[in-house]
Image (spheres, rainbow, N blue to C red):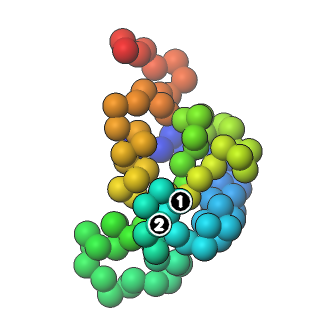
Amino acid sequence: MPMDKKRYPKNWAEISKKVKDNANWICQDCHLQCLQPKQGKNLARGLKAKLTLTVHHQDYCPENNQPSNLIALCSRCHLKRHSGKKGNIVLGQLSIL
């Protein structure tokens, strides 16, 4: 899911790290223990991707960075949340859904 960086605040890295820290780097859906920064340098690419923790906007709106809207999810659970959704459509993009 491509990220339109213009829709995120300049301090997104700080915001997302705080969400991940608050979740103890554990997916809040499947409870998978994910990698913290600087961990997993020697892991295979696929395994590293599986153990990557991301931050999901529950309302699918990257401009809404209220703590209650943000949840830490592993990459698999994050993709499942977006599967079949029309969330994160770029402003001005035509949607025929």
Q: Nearer the viewer, residue 10 or 15?
A: 15
Residue 45 at x, y = what percent? Answer: 27, 73
Residue at left offset 59%, top offset 34%: 59
In this rendering, the answer to whether 40 lies above or below 62 is below
Q: Nearer the viewer, residue 26 or 4?
A: 26
Q: Which residue is mark 1?
A: 28
Q: Quadrant of residue 52?
A: bottom left
Check the image and name the residue furthest to the bottom. 42
Query: Residue 68 in the image: x percent, y percent?
Result: 71, 46
Number of the label disc, if any, that sits on residue 55? none
Residue that appears at 46% across and 74% down: 33
Question: On screen, 68 above or below 37?
Answer: above
Mark 1, other Cα within 10 Å: few <14 / some 14–19 / many ≥20: some
Q: Secondary structure at mark 1?
A: loop
Residue type at numbered disc 1: Gln
Q: Are marks 2 and 1 in contact (CB under 8 Å)?
A: yes
Whether residue 31 is visible: yes
- Looking at the image, residue 71 sits to the left or right of residue 3; the answer is right
Image point (48%, 31%), residue name: 87
Horizontal side, residue 1 vs residue 59: left or right: left
Q: Split into 4 quadrants, where in the image is the N terminus? A: top left
Q: Nearer the viewer, residue 2 or 31?
A: 31
> Which residue type carries mark 2?
His
Residue 31 is tagged as 2
At 51% from the left and 40% from the top, the residue drawn is 4
**As displayed, is residue 46 above or below residue 36?**
above
Q: Position of residue 51 (x, y in %)?
A: 39, 70
In this view of the protein, can residue 7 be seen by the observer?
no
Q: Quadrant of the C terminus?
A: top left
All told, the count of numbered labels is 2
